[in-house]
Amino acid sequence: MAPNVMGEALNPSKEVAQDASPSVNNGDNGMHQQPNHEVEGRSATDYYAKGSAEAATENALTLAKIKHRLRLTKKDERLVIVLVGLPGRGKSFIARKLQNFLTWRGSECRVFNVGKYRRQAADGACAADFFDSKNEAAAQMRQKAASLALDDMLQWLDNEDLSGTTTPATATSRVRKDRVGIFDATNSTRERREWVLKECTCGIKRPGKPTGVVFVESICDDKDLLHANFMTKVNNSPDYKLMDVTEAMADLLSRVKKYEEAYETIEDDSMSYIKIFNLSSKMLVNHIYGRMAKSIVPALMAWNIGTRPVFVCRAGQTMNESERANLKCIMSKSEDLGPQGRAFRDALFSHMKEECLDFINRRQKAAFSPNLNTGTSISGNMNRGGFGSHRDLASLCDNKEEEGYVGTDGVTPLPFPCHIMSSTMPRARQTVAWEDMPYPVEMLSNLNPLDKGDFMGQELEDLAVKSPGWYNQLVADPFYTRFPGGECYGDLTSRLESVVVDIEQQVGPVLVISHVSVLQVLVAYFRNTPVEDCTSIALPLNTVLKFTPAKGGGWQESQHRVLNSPANSHCDLTSMDDDMDCDAQSTVGLGSPLMRTHMTSRLSVSSHRGRESPPEVISPLAAPPIWGDHNSNRNLMAPSLPLPSESNMME
């Protein structure tokens, strides 16, 4: 029987015997082997397309190369991020951004600033001579302050309060959180960094408490950026609150010079470290794996000191009950915008045009200022060659830049720059489907509403009766209670993490169109408020929330009502459902099982420009339900349970 040549060719570990090769008669009764060009061609193609098919094996070489990865990929419950850098290099800015981001994504994070301990130990501010490495008494006091801060951080990491007592788990969450301590100091010498590393990882002093340590060094040699950073420091640091600007700047420059005399950059490649140059214009990472590589490095690369605004709003309204009755159709997730939704779409276009052009005008004026956006990351190009690309100074300052921003058809000029992100829901996409303006829209399923799984389409008051056990869990823990076959709010932070990084890296205006549950989680990030309490964040209809970066790393917020309709002119703005029909009965006084604490921040509220009547105050205090594109007229039937305002389950 002839051998299966193809079968043998597919098994490279076997050799085909010469006498078993296929043969042909060449006419002289001689039998000669015919070369198998098909097999040879297949092997060459597979090699160049896929490389070797040989199973990978481990040996001493590969194990030696990945030993750091094996150690660092483990997800310890404790992580210490040690900041390194001269004064005025943005360390505290990075610390605040890290704390906000890590807390929002589910970790417990706290910053331990050695400067606070130093001021307490020295009983106030210190002159530049205090930071002279030759000043032995001051050096001892600086070391004492660093030791106190480090001890407090390690106690906190070990789940203890500062008195040494173990802190019980929070009653509001059943989820065990990891802890991240940020040690904010110059840590400018190799000796100081080795001391910090030893104290954090010593198995004798802290047995059974494995702790990862990563150094983050901020390096800046951009003179304009340094001057801007120094001005921010002298205007805000407690060290200079009693000095005028000139005196404070002279003292700070003298302090920096003292540090520079002893400064040693990180060169020990056995450590895990990240180097950031000129606030994210370049980054170097060494032995960074696991969660650091997955989450923190992309965030550090995205953060920049640009002043671009971020706008978020809910998708426009769909049809109300009477409109559906007239059309004899039922509510669905794929429903299109109704009349009110289309009116909001048009008003949103006018509002965004005015806001974005105002931003561009201010940016062009700032281009003639000495502190022109130095150090700003250029990773957030909004469109090829368009606004925000920052090719050079001239492109920012001349009016021809606008001509380079075109629609998705490659021809139509667009009137203003904006990076638009939308959920995949039709009503969200239609909210930015501006007529004759083919704006590129990034449609992301990450921005889709919370998945209610088996409970999709059901009312909360029904679930309170049908599934009282699950409903009681929701009341007790609204953030982490997962819908059967669906999601919980805690899941939203995971799928929104890449969205936050994408928003942060932009250098031009950003508009996000989504739904109540998703926007509540996003707004918690920009407000830097506990994400577990985001279910109490109110998001009124026909309203745009604008977030503008603050110098300290946070965001300033304002709210803009862009459409006044007969429906919402008399509607309670503190209890809006997502895309709900606002002509229902009042919901004042109704509790929500998703409300645990109240927001207390005061928000500035402005109306759409040109409106003659005074702006309406939009309260952030009430807790909207987590679902509802529409409102129903049903009465609440379970008075013994805290129920939300009337709505159905669709976002």
Image: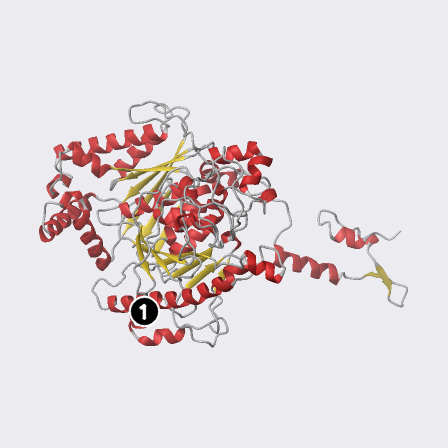
Query: Residue at 63% across / 45% down in the picture?
Result: 55
User: Where does residue 642 sit, x and y in percent of width and height?
Assistant: 47, 36
Query: Residue at 57% across / 40% down in the picture?
Result: 462
Quadrant of the rendered structure where residue 123 is? top left
Query: Residue at 15% across / 40% down in the picture?
Result: 131
The amino acid at mark 1 is Asp
Q: Give SS at disc 1.
A: loop
User: Where does residue 23 sit, x and y in percent of width and height?
Assistant: 84, 60
Q: Nearer the viewer, residue 146 or 167?
A: 167
Q: Compared with residue 156, is residue 21 higher up or lower down, i.e. above or below?
A: below
In the displayed structure image, the side of residue 134 where residue 426 appears, left or right:
right
Q: Compared with residue 369, is residue 580 higher up or lower down, i.e. above or below?
A: above
User: Where does residue 579 sit, x and y in percent of width and height?
Assistant: 49, 55
Q: Nearer the viewer, residue 158 or 261?
A: 158
How many dots with numbers?
A: 1
Q: Is residue 462 visible?
A: yes
- Local packing at callout 1 (Cα closer than 10 Å; few below 14, some 14-19, many 20+) is few
Q: Label 1: which residue?
A: 392
User: Where does residue 329 sit, x and y in percent of width and height?
Assistant: 62, 58
In the displayed structure image, the side of residue 36 where residue 411 appears, left or right:
left
Q: Compared with residue 499, is residue 288 higher up or lower down, i.e. above or below?
A: above
Q: Nearer the viewer, residue 445 or 347?
A: 347
